[in-house]
Image (cartoon, rainbow, N blue to C red):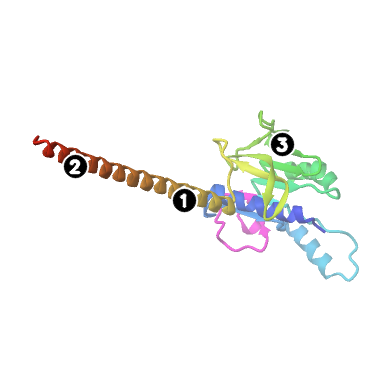
Amino acid sequence: MESDWHVVSITLLDELVRNHLGEPTHYFCGGNMFIYYSVEQAKEIEQYVEAETPKRKPRFKGPDFFLVRDVDGTKPRESWVVWNEDGRYPDLVVEFVSPSTRGKDVDANAQFYAHVFRVPEYFWFDRRSGELVGYRLVGRDYVRIEPDARGWLWSAVLGAYLGVWRGAYRGRVWSWLRLWDSEGQLVLTREEREARAEAQAQQERERAERERERAEQAEARAQQLQAELEQLRERLRQQGIEAE
């Protein structure tokens, strides 16, 4: 069974990608969704599900997260069926490593995504070790993506950096995989956007209140000066001096 962190990490990454790329009219992203890439594989899975005593495990493939560019992402899909999608395979895959999947994610999946799916970019993140590793397809094989000075990895597919961020998301404080845009600005969740908007609105209200208070103080000072001027004029008149 997947851990709470595993499930929530997929949700977080899906939210961040959508916030970064905008409405999914030109991309599709899926989390924990089956990818059917051959008729033979689909038949294996069908036979496995229907068999009372399955003989061998079929070729399941369901990345934790994947993205396909230049497709209509608003179309409902229960799975990604390659032959129904004009032969399109994922352009990016992310796996969240657990103790039971580390060997597969680190070694077997890298080979599979490079040689079978030909995925341009593949990333995996292990929260326990803090490792974030990325690969870019060069020729027929993957080449490691070198981290920058901040430890971030650039994704040309997303047009964003991937990096490790520790903080709270949905009430959980863990290390999460996050995105930063090309300017180095953290891609915010909806909750963070709302909190920032509220903070900015509060700052604007406080600024407006300070301006109002300054205006009132200036008006009070002007009235005080006018009263002092009238008092001075009155004293001068009493002395027979008419002030202009």
Residue 119 vs residue 219, the one in the foreground: 219
Give the image quarter of residue 86.
bottom right
Which residue type carries mark 3? Answer: Arg
Which type of secondary structure does the marked residue at label 1 adopt? Answer: helix
- Mark 1 vs 3, N-terminal side: 3
Which residue type carries mark 1? Answer: Ala
Give the Cα distance between marks 2 and 1: 43 Å
Residues shaded magenta: 67-89
Residue at the image point whose x is 85% and y is 44% from the top: 103
As drawn, the label of residue 75 is none
Residue indicated by mark 2: 230
Give the image quarter of residue 38.
bottom right
Tell me if label 1 and label 3 are in contact, CB under 8 Å.
no
Image side of residue 159 versus residue 118, left or right: left
- Mark 2 vs 3, N-terminal side: 3
Does residue 87 show up? Answer: no
Between circles 1 and 3, the one closer to the viewer is 1
Which type of secondary structure does the marked residue at label 3 adopt? Answer: loop
User: Which quarter of the rendering shows the N terminus?
Assistant: bottom right
User: Which quarter of the rendering shows the C terminus?
Assistant: top left
- Mark 2 vs 1, N-terminal side: 1
Give the image quarter of residue 8.
bottom right
Across and down, in percent, residue 23 comes to 52, 54
